[in-house]
Image (cartoon, coloured by chain):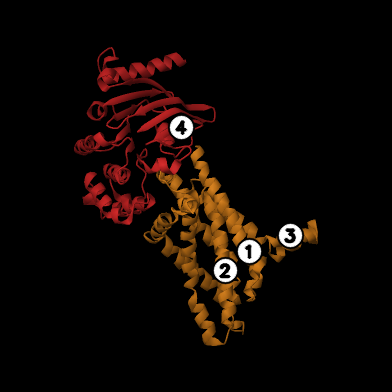
Amino acid sequence: MLDIQKLVKSFGTKRAVRGLSFTVEKGTVLGFLGPNGAGKSTTMRMISGVLEPDSGDALIAGKSVVSQRREAQAALGYLPEGAPLYDDMTPPEFLAFMAAARSLPKSERKPAIERAIADSRISTVCGQRIGSLSKGYRRRVGLAGAILHDPPVLLLDEPTDGLDPNQKRAVRALIARMAPTKAIVISTHTLTEVPAMCTRAIVIDRGRIVADETPEGLRQLSPDGTLEGAFTKLTDQAEAESA
Amino acid sequence: MNYLRQQLGSFVPVFRREIGAYYSTPMAYVFLAVFLLAIGMFTWEASSFFDTGTADLSPFFVWHPWLYMIFLPALAMRLWADETSAGTDELLLSLPLGMPGLVLGKLLAAWSVAGVGLLLTFPMWITVNFLGEPDNAAIILTYFVSFLMAGSYLSVGAAVSALTRSQVTAFVISVVIAFIFTAAGWPLVLSGVKSIFGAGFADLVAQFSFLSHFEAAQRGVLEFRAVLFFLGFMALWTILNGLWASRHRLG
């Protein structure tokens, strides 16, 4: 479903992503972990076609994001970091814009919008401008925009950031429900989210993959048997090696 | 054909989104109110509309380039800078949209707001018709060229807006560029250029000025080269706009 091939990106002299490769199959929920500045968001931006990679490619449902950008983007639902949205629109207006921008057939737009509103549980705030919504609701409106066209590949950057425990549970349930038919990548630095949502976890540090395991396998890499321990060990190790 | 549809398919959703942004916030209304107030004041007070003794709109049209120079960059400054500062450019660039449609959708949304401003000056036209018998065909023609000129100013503002995340910076740079292209045909500037670089160069400078190209239209003469100038000018800045907006993909 999603095939990442040797992605490389530098900003000036800083090498943000250094030859990242992995594949995600249908039915997998991949946790994409790493410390701040490890290259998570840069990788997400390259997969979504927002940034052009210096080299490498990402195939989304078989379409290259470099040479068939629009076809690849059509198969992808993307929630960018911080869930940027148009503040002057209401959630239904925003979703109508997304439906039009994704060229959904006119007859499918209304049911798709209603389904996305129900799935992301934002029906109570439909009359409000997005600018007046709380962080948690904004994130859910962004999520509704990402799942609107029922894409085979979902790319979610920090989808549960700023949500209260009830909302987090609702988002996890939604992801679990969508998981069997989609390939989902979730970037996060909240480690407790990983066993709750993901079937597989990749840890990256300084633009390289340092671990690719199940959450359980990742836990066993650590001296004390916790995910946090594994995370610290893996990312510290990379730091020591590069020093 | 299919290629065109891919590139321009983004026009309608983007145009509608931008129109919504102008009219669902006070932006369009404030722009229209202040623009109409300013053009009314200049026409009546500075040009003494009633004292000219002729029933035409020249005391009204003469101010268009100068007011556009200030007002239209204010209308265009948000088009791209706002996306960049709010982070919504990332959302927009992740959608399967063609850049040409995106650029044109944004420009035409701003241009249509300016067009509404121009249409709302109709009381001036009614007034001259009430007072005398003006050449209405000439007036319509001048309106048409003025509308083209408005698009040219907006194309500069929209392109510059893609270069920065600050709307204020976009506004200031656009006004400076707009001033250069306006004032290049100003007699005060032209006589200075003439005395330093000679008459030939002064003629060349005047060729690139909005004032020179609007001048014939103000007299009710449709100059083909003026129409071509404004269309070409817009095309150039629209291409620059697309290039500068595409730079976002490079990071």
- The residue at which mark 2 appears reads as B146
- B229 relative to B250 in the view: left or right: right
Q: Could you classify mark 4 by the number of other residues whose Cα lies within 10 Å: few (under 14), some (14-19), or many (20 or more)?
A: many
Q: Could you classify mark 1 by the number of other residues whose Cα lies within 10 Å: few (under 14), some (14-19), or many (20 or more)?
A: few
Residue at the image position 30 percent from the left and 53 percent from the top: A129
Instruction: Note whether A159 is above or below B42 in the view shown.
Output: above
Q: Position of residue B138 (x, y in %)?
A: 60, 78
Dot 2 falls on a residue whose secondary structure is: helix
Instruction: Note whether B126 is above or below A223 in the view shown.
Output: below
Instruction: Note whether A150 is above or below B227 in the view shown.
Output: above
- Judge whether residue A189 can be spotted in this image: no
Dot 1 falls on a residue whose secondary structure is: helix
Q: Colour of chain A?
A: red
Instruction: Note whether A162 is above or below B173 in the view shown.
Output: above
Q: Amino acid at mark 1?
A: Leu
Q: Earlier in the sequence, mark 3 or mark 2?
A: 2
Numbered label attached to residue A57: 4
